[in-house]
Protein backbone atom coordinates (compact mmCIF):
# COMPACT_ATOMS: atom_id res chain seq x y z
CA UNK A 1 0.00 0.00 0.00
CA UNK A 2 1.22 3.49 -0.90
CA UNK A 3 2.14 5.75 2.03
CA UNK A 4 -0.01 8.88 2.26
CA UNK A 5 0.94 11.32 5.01
CA UNK A 6 -1.58 13.35 6.96
CA UNK A 7 -0.85 17.07 7.15
CA UNK A 8 0.49 17.29 3.60
CA UNK A 9 -1.23 18.57 0.46
CA UNK A 10 -1.15 16.65 -2.82
CA UNK A 11 -1.44 17.37 -6.55
CA UNK A 12 -2.96 15.42 -9.43
CA UNK A 13 0.61 15.11 -10.78
CA UNK A 14 1.86 13.19 -7.70
CA UNK A 15 3.68 15.99 -5.89
CA UNK A 16 3.31 16.52 -2.15
CA UNK A 17 3.48 19.89 -0.42
CA UNK A 18 4.21 20.70 3.22
CA UNK A 19 3.11 24.23 4.11
CA UNK A 20 5.32 25.94 6.70
CA UNK A 21 4.06 29.53 7.01
CA UNK A 22 4.80 31.14 3.63
CA UNK A 23 7.18 28.33 2.61
CA UNK A 24 6.18 25.21 0.67
CA UNK A 25 8.41 22.13 0.86
CA UNK A 26 7.86 20.06 -2.29
CA UNK A 27 8.61 16.47 -3.25
CA UNK A 28 7.19 13.51 -5.15
CA UNK A 29 4.76 11.10 -3.55
CA UNK A 30 5.42 7.53 -2.53
CA UNK A 31 3.16 6.47 -5.42
CA UNK A 32 5.27 8.50 -7.90
CA UNK A 33 8.60 7.09 -6.70
CA UNK A 34 7.15 3.56 -6.87
CA UNK A 35 5.93 4.12 -10.46
CA UNK A 36 9.30 5.58 -11.52
CA UNK A 37 11.22 2.81 -9.75
CA UNK A 38 15.02 3.30 -9.68
CA UNK A 39 15.63 7.06 -9.65
CA UNK A 40 19.10 7.92 -10.95
CA UNK A 41 19.06 11.72 -11.35
CA UNK A 42 17.35 14.83 -10.03
CA UNK A 43 17.65 18.10 -11.95
CA UNK A 44 15.86 20.95 -10.15
CA UNK A 45 15.63 24.55 -11.30
CA UNK A 46 17.93 27.05 -9.59
CA UNK A 47 17.47 28.98 -6.36
CA UNK A 48 16.05 32.42 -7.14
CA UNK A 49 13.91 31.31 -10.08
CA UNK A 50 10.27 32.38 -9.90
CA UNK A 51 7.76 29.81 -11.12
CA UNK A 52 4.03 29.79 -11.70
CA UNK A 53 1.77 26.99 -10.53
CA UNK A 54 1.93 24.15 -13.08
CA UNK A 55 5.39 25.01 -14.46
CA UNK A 56 8.18 22.44 -14.37
CA UNK A 57 10.45 22.89 -11.33
CA UNK A 58 12.53 19.71 -11.66
CA UNK A 59 13.11 16.63 -13.76
CA UNK A 60 13.43 13.22 -12.15
CA UNK A 61 15.19 10.57 -14.21
CA UNK A 62 14.72 6.91 -13.52
CA UNK A 63 16.16 3.85 -15.24
CA UNK A 64 12.94 3.32 -17.21
CA UNK A 65 11.56 6.88 -17.62
CA UNK A 66 11.97 10.58 -16.92
CA UNK A 67 9.28 12.67 -15.30
CA UNK A 68 8.76 16.35 -14.72
CA UNK A 69 7.94 17.72 -11.29
CA UNK A 70 5.46 20.60 -11.46
CA UNK A 71 5.12 23.59 -9.15
CA UNK A 72 2.03 22.95 -7.02
CA UNK A 73 2.03 26.66 -6.11
CA UNK A 74 3.46 29.87 -7.58
CA UNK A 75 6.52 31.38 -5.92
CA UNK A 76 10.28 31.76 -5.73
CA UNK A 77 12.59 28.78 -5.29
CA UNK A 78 14.55 29.50 -2.11
CA UNK A 79 16.30 26.20 -1.44
CA UNK A 80 17.26 23.00 -3.28
CA UNK A 81 17.83 19.69 -1.50
CA UNK A 82 21.47 19.22 -2.53
CA UNK A 83 21.57 15.82 -0.77
CA UNK A 84 18.84 14.57 -3.12
CA UNK A 85 20.67 15.98 -6.14
CA UNK A 86 23.86 14.14 -5.11
CA UNK A 87 21.97 10.99 -3.99
CA UNK A 88 18.75 10.82 -6.06
CA UNK A 89 17.96 7.38 -4.59
CA UNK A 90 16.74 9.35 -1.53
CA UNK A 91 13.57 10.06 -3.53
CA UNK A 92 12.93 6.29 -3.60
CA UNK A 93 14.08 5.55 -0.06
CA UNK A 94 12.50 8.48 1.78
CA UNK A 95 10.18 10.52 -0.49
CA UNK A 96 8.56 12.45 2.39
CA UNK A 97 11.61 13.07 4.57
CA UNK A 98 15.18 12.93 3.17
CA UNK A 99 13.98 13.02 -0.44
CA UNK A 100 12.26 16.42 -0.58
CA UNK A 101 13.20 18.33 -3.73
CA UNK A 102 12.92 22.07 -3.11
CA UNK A 103 11.45 24.87 -1.04
CA UNK A 104 9.36 27.63 -2.51
CA UNK A 105 8.33 31.00 -1.00
CA UNK A 106 4.58 31.01 -1.69
CA UNK A 107 3.44 33.95 -3.82
CA UNK A 108 -0.33 33.36 -3.65
CA UNK A 109 -1.72 31.47 -0.63
CA UNK A 110 -5.15 31.25 -2.33
CA UNK A 111 -3.67 28.51 -4.57
CA UNK A 112 -3.32 26.18 -1.56
CA UNK A 113 -7.07 25.51 -1.62
CA UNK A 114 -6.71 23.85 -5.06
CA UNK A 115 -4.54 21.06 -3.58
CA UNK A 116 -5.88 17.74 -2.27
CA UNK A 117 -5.65 16.75 1.38
CA UNK A 118 -4.57 13.24 2.41
CA UNK A 119 -8.13 11.88 2.40
CA UNK A 120 -8.86 13.15 -1.13
CA UNK A 121 -5.49 11.84 -2.35
CA UNK A 122 -6.19 8.39 -0.87
CA UNK A 123 -9.54 8.29 -2.70
CA UNK A 124 -7.75 9.09 -5.97
CA UNK A 125 -5.66 5.96 -5.47
CA UNK A 126 -8.55 3.82 -4.25
CA UNK A 127 -7.37 3.55 -0.63
Image: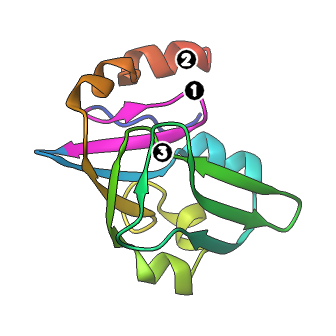
Q: Residue at x 52, y 68 (%)?
A: 45
Mark 1 to mark 3 CA distance (whole Å): 11 Å
Residue in the foreground of this view, choosing between 19 and 4:
19
The residue at which mark 2 appears reads as: 127
Identify the image quadrant of the N terminus: top right
Q: Determine the residue located farthest toward the bottom in the rendered image.
A: 86
Query: Up-down: is 11 above or below 101?
Result: above
Residue 126 lies in what quarter of the image? top right
Q: Residue at x 62, y 72 (%)?
A: 42
Q: Residues within 10 Å of mark 3 (few under 14, many from 20)?
A: many
Query: Up-down: is 31 above or below 40?
Result: above
Q: Residues within 10 Å of mark 1 (few under 14, many from 20)?
A: few
Could you say which disc has been placed on residue 101 in the image? Answer: none
Could you say which disc has been placed on residue 12 in the image? Answer: 1
Give the mark nearer the N terminus: 3 vs 2. 3
In the image: residue 40, left or right of residue 21? right
Read off the magenta span: 7-19
The residue at which mark 3 appears reads as: 71
Residue 8 is inside the magenta segment: yes
Amino acid sequence: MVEVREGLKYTENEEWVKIEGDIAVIGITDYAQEELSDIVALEPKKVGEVVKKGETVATVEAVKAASDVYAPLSGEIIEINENAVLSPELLNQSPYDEGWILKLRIENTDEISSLMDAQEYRKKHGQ
